Amino acid sequence: MKRQRMIFGRYIAGDSWMHRLDPRAKILAVPLFMAAVFLVDDYTKLLALLAFTLLLVKSTSISLLAVARAVKSLWLLLSFIVLFHLLFDSSGAQLMQVGAVALYTGGLERGIVAALRMVMFIVFAAVLTFTTQPDQLAQGLGEVLAPLRRLGVRSDRLTLMLGIALRFVPTLFDEAQRIWKAQVSRGLDLRSQPLQKRARLLAALLIPVTAGALRRAVALAEAMEARGYRLDAPRTRYRSLSWQLRDSCFLGLFVLPIAAAAWL
Amino acid sequence: MVQKKKSNPVIRMKDVVCRRATGEAPVINGVTLTVERGEWVCVAGGNGSGKSTLVRLLNGLLLAESGTIEIDGRWLRADTLWDIRQKVGIVFPQPDDQFVGLTVEDDLAFGLENQGLSPEAIDKRLWQIAAQFNLTELLDRHPGTLSGGQKQRVALAAVLAMQPEILILDEASAMLDGSSRADLLSWLKRTHRSGLLTIVMITHEIEEMAAADRLIVLREGCVVADGKPGELLGDEGLLQDSRLEIPYALQVCRELRQLGVETGEWTTEREAVDALWALVSKISASPIRMEQALSV
Amino acid sequence: MSFQLREGAMTAVLGAPGSGKSTLLQHFNGLLLPDSGNVRVGEITLDAGSSQAACRAVRRRVGLVFQYPEQQLFEETVLQDLCFGPLNHGVDEAEAEAAARRAAQWMGLDDSLLARSPFRLSSGQQRRAAIAAVLACDPDIIVLDEPTASLDAAGRCELMARLDAMCREAGKTVLVATHRLEDVAPYAEDYVVLREGQLTFHGAGHTLLQHTAALEAAGVIVPGAIRLALGVAELTGIEFDRIWPQPSELAAAIHQAYERGRPT
């Protein structure tokens, strides 16, 4: 059955300036942005950074709803961050007493700031994947990591693994869905089972999917070798990325917030 | 004066033995055969007969324990593997498990990248092969959005882009529906007529076997039959042993013979169909209608 | 789309890949619910608002075998896998094992195979085991999606013959979705042709062959052997109850006509 909808990588087609950037620029911007996010230490700078992030998102054609959904999916992580600070930070005035645990305003404040930092990071990462096609992402990452080869990091193997993962994740996902449906057709019903039994019943999904993935891996390796692939042997690259002025400008854009965060 | 066709073997196997693991029974048990350049050979046999192993020996995916294999005049050994793989292309049965690239374009370029061609050369060949196989519209699609037939087309194109001399098809149509299989078969027939490729094909389908120059039947790692498909497909004992389909017309004629109704001499399916038709038109009330589309 | 399945007979659903066969089949056991209209199985009716409990009840009566069902095998032994279905439906262990053994017999699986790991069976045995796993739940209606996919010729004939036996001897209702007319032609009584989600034909075998245009439009090829049988039947005026008689049947009928026509 043909599936026209590409759900994977959450790539949203578009033609904004961010879509047209070299993937290497976008990938290199990640640690720069991360540095900025963690260097800001007062409220004005934090809000300025937040405004910068939202402006960035707005200028691409990505809907805020999609970004909001990406943030929402990590609500567990965000609540954990807030909770962590709330429970273990005892600075500031006492807010309330919950049983034996005392909660303080300082904790709440720090928790919210930490969560906000995380939100900005998630937003940035989300927009990156929304505006970069998976194959571009893989290639970009491969080229960014290439210099590490001198340090002994097998960056070409990493790129290969990433590429194959990106290629097969949708396929494996489809297969998992099919297997799940097949087991449900045989009466599998997790909801009616106690917790311990549920773990065991998940084997009905995990084992076939794993076995399938292993089978595919062997077949794929054979197919690759048959087409002349040799691990670690030199090979040409058909696609090439070309760095443009706009990519340098984009990176330059990120140096500003860091400088501002660090020195102002 | 009949001129004997000059022998031009492109594959030569001699006393080849191959085992999956030491101590186990051999999967290929002493096979000797020669394939001429431009020939179309079908390999058939039941499960476990060694068909898949045989073709994997031809491009070194498996190495023989003993015996020799010569591809286009070169001995197949661990050090000549890479060169030989340039000449031998293989299409596997599973459309998904041989699709390496993230997009059709990437997959078509994969083999060419391995061969070390320059990006310009890859570009040229890629567009050529994409046009030939009607893939131009599909170049930027992820395999998850393609049908099985489309993926197999990409697989075939990707292998042919490397310009091999020998094309091996390992049950390449097993996962395909009727029309995709028919498309593949007509492409094979056209290509075979041009004489540019030597084709070795593993199949269960009678029509594919019938279209080939030669049919080799394997059983338990040995060649039990090697000859013209027309003749072999009339040998019921052979077909039954190899778990192959006995053509319908042949079965009907055999049953009729048992009932005492003679249908004349027939050894091939075509002859059986003709004989059956002749018999039926003799006993029918209405005149023979030759337009009854009988393309068995 | 509206139609009724004939009880105790084999119905064939013909159509090319993408015609909606798989989607249709998933409506038969509640994996998918219709947007409008309903699916009635015995006393249970499924519609857009049906509960999961209703779907589960349907699954006790309808067994669905997906394409390449061997992918769903996961237990340590074949016997355990065959028991999975009945156990999910609340059957006790002893009865489940008995049902499993019965199903194994139906599919011609030797007792010795039952103690083996499903991953140690040959591909043909795995296919039969997976189908037996669905049969073990003892459904009244068995729905199969391309059950003969990638089997060799002998395997296809054997499987179809077994499915036919389920109808004739066990009184089951069997529905086979396929693109291969030659697989179902010797056994099916009713034919449904699908094209792009629409039902373009529903009727008995004889009328099907008068609508070859519908078949061709749906991407189903009428193999030469069937056309041969048709031609023979037409010329000799013989009628058969299945669209593709067994060779012995055809030979017997020709023999009869021959005897009748022989000059005395």
Image (tube, rainbow, N blue to C red):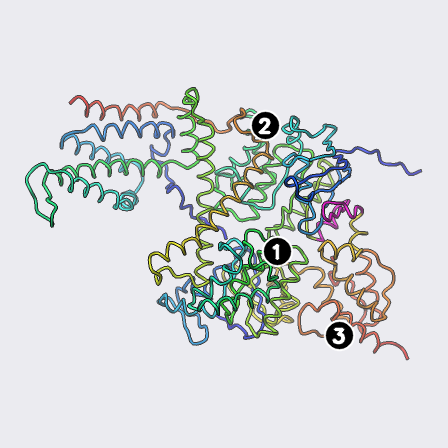
Q: Percent from the top left, x then y, of residue B123?
A: 55, 29
Q: Is residue C11 visible?
A: yes
Three-letter amino acid code of the residue under disc 1: Gly
Depth order, front residue of C213/B167:
B167
Specify the segment rendered in magenta. B206-227
Chain label for disc 2: B
Chain label for disc 1: C
Q: Report the residue marked by disc 3.
A: C237
Chain label for disc 3: C
Image quadrant in which you'd find residue B285: bottom right
- Residue drawn at x 78%, y 49% as measured from the top left: B229
* Label 2 residue SS: loop
Three-letter amino acid code of the residue under disc 3: Gly
**Relative to A125, is C119 above or below?**
below
Q: CA distance from mark 3 to mark 2?
A: 63 Å
Q: Assess disc 1: are there few (<14), some (14-19) or many (≥20) residues with their C-alpha within 10 Å of its C-alpha.
A: some
- Residue drawn at x 44%, y 35% as measured from the top left: A162
Image quadrant in which you'd find residue B73: top right
Q: Do the residues at discs 2 and 1 belong to one chain?
A: no
* Label 3 residue SS: loop
- Asked if residue B15 lies in the magenta stretch, the reply is no
Q: Report the residue marked by disc 2.
A: B115
Q: Report the residue marked by disc 1.
A: C124
- Asked if residue B225 lies in the magenta stretch, the reply is yes
